[in-house]
């Protein structure tokens, strides 16, 4: 399946949001990660069951600290 993740086209075999996040090693992130699919925020409790479709636009935002 082809997705657009943070503006980049990605080819993946995953079909759920949690599986996609696993490929980016973010599935266990408790805080500091926000995800939107096609401009709609998906809460963490929905990640395991959220089905992705061909050409979905996924934005993954990870909070960082700095000064």
Image (cartoon, rainbow, N blue to C red):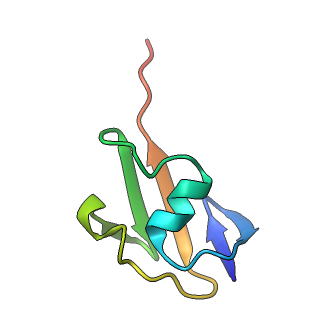
Q: Nearer the viewer, residue 18 or 9?
A: 18
Residue 54 in the image: state x and y as whole percent: 62, 87
Quadrant of the rendered image containing residue 48: bottom left
> Is 29 placed above or below 43 here?
above
Question: Looking at the figure, which quarter contains the C terminus?
Answer: top left
> Is 8 placed above or below 50 here?
above
| Apparent side of residue 53 relative to residue 36 in the rendered image (left or right) | right
Count of number-bearing discs: 0
> Is 40 placed above or below 25 here?
below
Q: Nearer the viewer, residue 65 or 12?
A: 12
Question: Looking at the figure, which quarter contains the N terminus?
Answer: bottom right
Tell me the residue at 35%/77% (across/down). Answer: 49
Residue 35 in the image: state x and y as whole percent: 41, 59
Q: Nearer the viewer, residue 46 or 7?
A: 46
> Going by the picture, which residue comes out furthest to the top?
67
Residue 21 in the image: state x and y as whole percent: 51, 57
Tell me the residue at 24%/64% (across/down). Answer: 45
Tell me the residue at 66%/62% (across/down). Answer: 7
Tell me the residue at 38%/43% (across/down). Answer: 29
Residue 31 in the image: state x and y as whole percent: 30, 39
Quadrant of the rendered image containing residue 23: bottom right
């Amino acid at each position: 399946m082809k997705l657009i993740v943070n503006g980049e086209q990605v080819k993946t075999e995953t079909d759920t949001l949690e599986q996609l996040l696993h490929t980016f090693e973010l599935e266990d992130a408790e805080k500091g990660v926000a995800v939107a699919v096609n401009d709609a925020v998906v809460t963490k409790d929905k990640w395991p069951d959220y089905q992705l479709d061909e050409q979905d636009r996924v934005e993954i935002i990870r909070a960082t600290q700095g000064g």
